[in-house]
Amino acid sequence: MATRERGAGPGGISPPGDAAATPGQAGDSGAEGTEGTDGAARAGGSLRLIARTFAENRAAVAGLVLIAAITLFCFVGPLLYPTNQVTVQLGIAKLPPSARYPLGTDPSGYNVLGRLMLGGQSSLELGFAVSIATTVLGTLYGAIAGLAGGVVDAAMMRVIDTLLAVPALVLLLILVNIFTPNLWVIILLLTFLSWLAIARLVRGEVLTLRTREFVQAARMMGAGRRRIVLRHLVPNAIGVIVVNATFTVADAILTLSALSFLGLGLPPPQADWGGMLSNGLNYLFDGYWWLVYPPAIILIVTVVAFNLVGDAIRDSLDVRLQRP
């Protein structure tokens, strides 16, 4: 079957004057193809350089392995080691670690090892949910403010300054007392208080990017603000966004732990590491160490792991620290 050439008329016959491409046209097409290939090659090379810089950071790799291990422990562990985390069993309350109960039991008779898994599910789900929601909301808000500029930018930033003037923990305690705390309510409240920082960071990045040549060229070609934000500004600010999102996971887990420590966390039978730590401290001086140390250790390790990964991503995206 004959293939119709580009620009050919019906029957594959080229219209007059277009039978063959001129040398200049052929050269332009070749240049565009070469430029596209070179651009893809440069992008691939940059990604490989970033990945190599990240992999050379042993602390970052260790943090990534720890995050993977803790995630498997929390979500796959209950499938391999099922426990009863709903029914109170006072007959086996506060038992020390043994072969049957590797980390003992708590004052309600719950298996502490199974409790750690259940609490980890709540902590990680909240951390990732708050990070995603915060990143999306803050990124769009900051990008729109930075691109708009002028009165719109000033008004949007005054909203952020007003919210930042209120102590976050005090406001959070007030809101938690107003609304009945559960996992989704706490996610919404933490998102409401956490998107301000990423919005300011993205807005600062957009202010430096909006005067760049590629943004001006997109405007001259008729691109709308939505396309400029989503296709040009946000991808070029991805480094700041990813680093902040990683730190937000750790901050959200710590904030949930702080609320639970103050008795304003998730209601039973839900659990989280902060609530376990708060309950265990009441029995620490009676010798029930297994009620305090396991949740404290896994909480510290999780937060440190996310911070290590966040630091490594920031260093990997910093061209001054990359080695060709």
Image (cartoon, grey):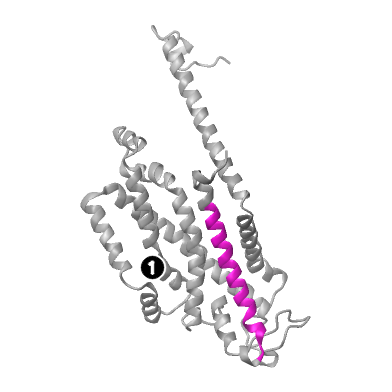
Residue located farthest toward the left when viewing the structure as drawn: 151
Q: Which residue is mark 1?
A: 193
| Image spot of residue 97 (x, y percent) | 73, 83
Relative to 214, is 319 on the left or the right?
right
From this view, report whether residue 112 is shown above or below residue 19.
Answer: below
| Image spot of residue 299 (x, y percent) | 58, 72
Q: Magenta part of the protein: which range?
A: 287-313
Q: Tell me, yes or no, whether the highlighted magenta stretch contains residue 290.
A: yes
Relative to 79, is 8 on the left or the right?
left
Which quadrant of the structure image shows residue 142?
A: bottom left
From this view, report whether residue 11 is shown above or below residue 89.
Answer: above
- Residue 110 showing in the rendered view: no
Which quadrant of the structure image shows residue 177?
A: bottom left
Which quadrant holds the N terminus?
top right
Q: Tell me, yes or no, whether the highlighted magenta stretch contains residue 9.
A: no
Residue located farthest toward the right when viewing the structure as drawn: 99
